[in-house]
Amino acid sequence: MASIRLEKVWKTYPNGHIAARGVDLTIADGEFMVLVGPSGCGKSTALRMIAGLETPSAGRVMIGDRDVTALPPQERDVAMVFQSYALYPHMTVRDNLAFGLRMRGAAPAAIAARVEGAARALGLESVLGRKPGQLSGGQRQRVALGRAIVREPLVFLFDEPLSNLDAKLRLETRAELARLHRRLAATMVYVTHDQEEALTLGSRVAVMREGQVEQVGPPLEVYRRPATVFVATFVGSPAMNLLPADVLAGQPPGGSPFGAAATLGVRPHDIAVVPAASGDLDALVDVVEPRGSELLVYLRLGRSGGGPEIRVITPPDLEIAPDDVVGLRFDRERLHVFERDTGQRLGS
């Protein structure tokens, strides 16, 4: 396998749109890196530049020790799995899996061994004689994965490969991808707009916004210590609550002095509902949304409900109803403070 480096990569399209703005990103050999962000953030463009389907306007793309910036896709030894399955409808599953190897002139015995191995790994042995039209959506997606696996490339690239599947199949195929990465120890780069998918799949996560990488790190680090307000609100569901605040004492490391305008962040799971007047703030209950194992409660700060909205996750058996006045107690160890103007995190 191989490492990947994007070195100060820019991509400007002829219409003037800048899709990548000096992206610096290193992906280790054998790592499962997930690029996540909203539509238009540049994540698919970054993937396509690694694949060779787009050429950077500036900067370099390295795979291993090779500068592949100007190399065509077929010379990069990467395999890409797209959102669309792109299978040959007139071919059987076996022939779809073998097609790329045959085009490269691989020996028949080697082709057979690789196809059988991929079919075993993905649970496709019983459908090798069928055509794509006879398969479920999940099976077709696994055939697309298998076609990449049989090539044994240096790098696997996935561009939102699960977005066409229903919720149950997405979960099953996601687990299959995680097992596959563990089994192959391959370098994988995966693009998604689904932050839950990113947190469950990635060895590390790169959160992108407007063509730039906002934060890179292990999923739990990105969730627990978001570097910016954007990361704080994009990663985690429901989104982090943000409240205007001022720094009244002390000086957070690397941050602004007391008196500076700040934004206080607190996740819905880190707020407890307590009797009125016994917490940090009082609030008026607006909406109570049962979610099976928990309640999602929407409140307005202040006894009259005239303040900002705040969301809280509570146990499912909490007796609470709209128009109740309750207290809110914040977990002091899990508060986040950001500089108001820049959105950057202020210390711990």
Image (cartoon, rainbow, N blue to C red):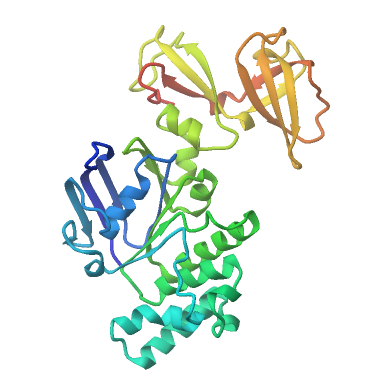
Camera-side residue of 178 and 15: 15
Instruction: State whether residue 290 is above or below residue 331.
Output: below
Q: Position of residue 68 (x, y in %)?
A: 19, 60
Q: Position of residue 128 (x, y in %)?
A: 54, 83
Q: Quadrant of residue 16?
A: top left
Camera-side residue of 7 and 70: 70
Residue 9 horizontal side relative to residue 323, left or right: left
Name the residue at 57% across, 76% down.
123
Camera-side residue of 309 and 263: 309
Q: Position of residue 110 (x, y in %)?
A: 37, 89
Residue 155 horizontal side relative to residue 165, left or right: left
Name the residue at 45% across, 75% down.
88
Name the residue at 25% across, 69% down.
74
- The quadrant in which the C terminus is found is top left
Camera-side residue of 122 and 84: 84
Instruction: State whether residue 344 is above or below residue 136.
Output: above
- The quadrant in which the N terminus is found is bottom left
Residue 263 horizontal side relative to residue 111, left or right: right
